[in-house]
Image (cartoon, grey):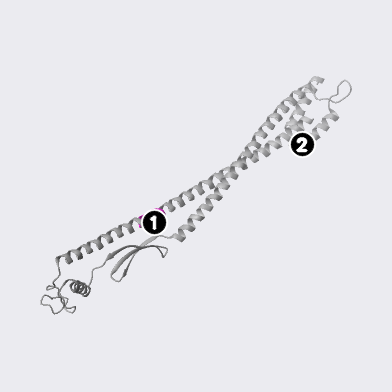
Amino acid sequence: MDSHTAERAENELLHFLLEGAASSQEIESIREEFLATGPTDGAGRRKWPSSMMTEVGRLRSTVEAAEANRKVLQGRVKELEEELSVERKGKEDLEARLGALSSSDAEAGKPTLQTRTNEGVATTVASVAGKLVLADIGTSPLKHSKEEEGRSWVEVCSQTTPREGSPHHQCPSEKDGDDDNTVCSAEDLASLKREIRRLKQEAVESAKCATNKLRSARDQLSSREVDLARAQRAGEMAEKRIEKMENELREVTERLREEAATSERLETKLKL
């Protein structure tokens, strides 16, 4: 085997050994062995073959590309960490809002209507969580009993008819409640009817007012429930985004670690 063929075989073996090196220690071992047995220059110093100089150039380009890629990955890691911090802060705000809405709903409860009767008058009120929030919303007169109607007619008669003992005095007794022979003026009857109509109208208006206020309370409760549902959905979406970012951050960090190991290995080869 001539010297040229031997040198080429030696170069191929060296290239194969360097490519297959698994660690910087192994590369250093190959280098020491080559310097001890490899070719020398005119001054008797060991030198790398010209073919290996081409390999050195290729390795240097690879190192530069790996370094640039590592910088890109480091920038991406920084961006992901900032985005993750923002998402976590937003998630904390959502959780705080969700807790506030939940506690507010627990304290507020659902509004309910109640009708209370006091001295013949029905009063409609709205309560929330057992607490009265809309008092005296409206009153409506209840139907009087026969005894109460008799007393009313007696009171009217005492004011509009002749005194007792007069031949025109025919007010009924409270016992029988019979008002067929009661003598009252048309003006008194009209006034009484107007008063009844007024009370009925007030009852209707009060009932409408109570209904409107109850509807408003229910709308407010519905609005809180919608806000609560939106906050819950936003929290779930934030959790998914955070999980996705954490996974991507782990992947990029792993790639960065691999790139760093590759760069270290290539730089060790270049030192040879």
Q: Answer with left or right where residue 255 lies relative to residue 220.
A: right
Residue 215 in view of the camera: yes
Q: Dominant secondary structure of the magenta stretch? A: helix
Task: Estimate the x, y position of residue 51 in percent, counting from the top left.
Answer: 76, 22
Q: Residue at x 28, y 64 (%)?
A: 140
Quarter of the C terminus within the rendering: top right
Disc with the residue nearer the chain's start (1 vs 2) = 2
Residue 136, above or below 271: below
Q: Quadrant of the N terminus?
A: top right
Q: Residue 30 at x, y = what percent? A: 80, 33
Q: At 30% across and 57% down in the image, what residue appears?
A: 208
Residue 2 in percent (x, y) is at 81, 19
Residue 23 in the image, given as x and y percentages of width and height: 75, 37
Task: Specify the amino acid type for callout 1.
Answer: Ala
Q: Is residue 2 visible?
A: no
Q: Using a 10 Å C-alpha cutoff, classify the residue at mark 1 as few (fewer than 14 neighbours), some (14 to 19) or many (20 or more).
A: some
According to the picture, the residue beneath numbered tag 1 turns out to be 217
Residues in magenta, as a range: 214-220
Q: Is residue 78 left or right of residue 143?
A: right
Q: Residue 139: within the magenta?
A: no
Q: Secondary structure at mark 1?
A: helix
Contact? badges 1 and 2 (CB < 8 Å): no
Gap in angstroms between the C-alphas marked 1 and 2: 75 Å
Which residue does the image show at 70% across and 35% down from the upper left?
Answer: 262
The reply to whether the magenta stretch includes residue 217 is yes
Front residue of this view, candidates 46 and 141: 141
The reply, left or right, for residue 59 in relation to residue 252 is right
In the picture, the disc for residue 24 is 2
